[in-house]
Amino acid sequence: MSLSAVQDVEVAHDATYKYVLVRVHAQGGAAHKDVVRGFPSAEFHADVYDKLSAEVESLGLDCECLGGGRIQHDSTTKTIKVYGHSVGFGKADHSVTTEKLKAKYPDYTITHSDEGY
């Protein structure tokens, strides 16, 4: 299956929640892309990763978690703040996450910080 079958960004609106930055590999491992996932019902970053991992594996692809953090998404003010870290996976490169989010939400103000948890 092609990497294009996996969306670059799937995040919830109007909430603050845990997210992970994940590298998805095509079969053979040479081609890859980074994707962002986050949703408020996840108690742990691993919950977000496990859900994506199952989806990716069902497509015949492989993935690895590059780290995590938190997203604060407000669709009313069109702002997203990316910050914090994952205890289990470490801190994601928030600048990569921010660029992915800007591509999906070009009319938003999106910022990132290494502060907070």
Image (tube, rainbow, N blue to C red):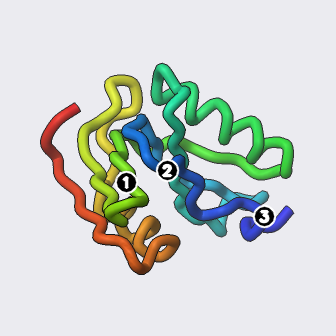
Q: Position of residue 74 (x, y in %)?
A: 37, 54
Q: Secondary structure at mark 1?
A: strand
How far is the residue under mark 3 from the one under mark 1?
27 Å
Specify the label residue 5 is tagged with. 3
At horizontal 79% and vertical 42% (from top left) the residue drawn is 57
The residue located at (44%, 47%) in the rendering is 14
Q: Is residue 84 left or right of residue 31?
A: left
* Residue type, mark 3 in image: Ala
Q: Residue at x 67, y 34 (%)?
A: 51
Locate residue 45, reporting x and y percent: 47, 29
| Residues under numbered marks 3 and 1 in contact, where contact means CB atoms less than 8 Å apart | no
Q: Circle 2 sits on which residue?
A: 13
User: Which dot, 2 or 3, sits closer to the camera?
Assistant: 2
Q: Position of residue 98 (x, y in %)?
A: 35, 64
Residue 101 vs residue 23, the one in the foreground: 101
Q: CA distance from mark 2 to mark 1?
A: 6 Å
Horizontal side, residue 13 vs residue 92: left or right: right
Residue 52's place in the image compared with 86, above or below, is: below
> For mark 1, what is the residue?
74
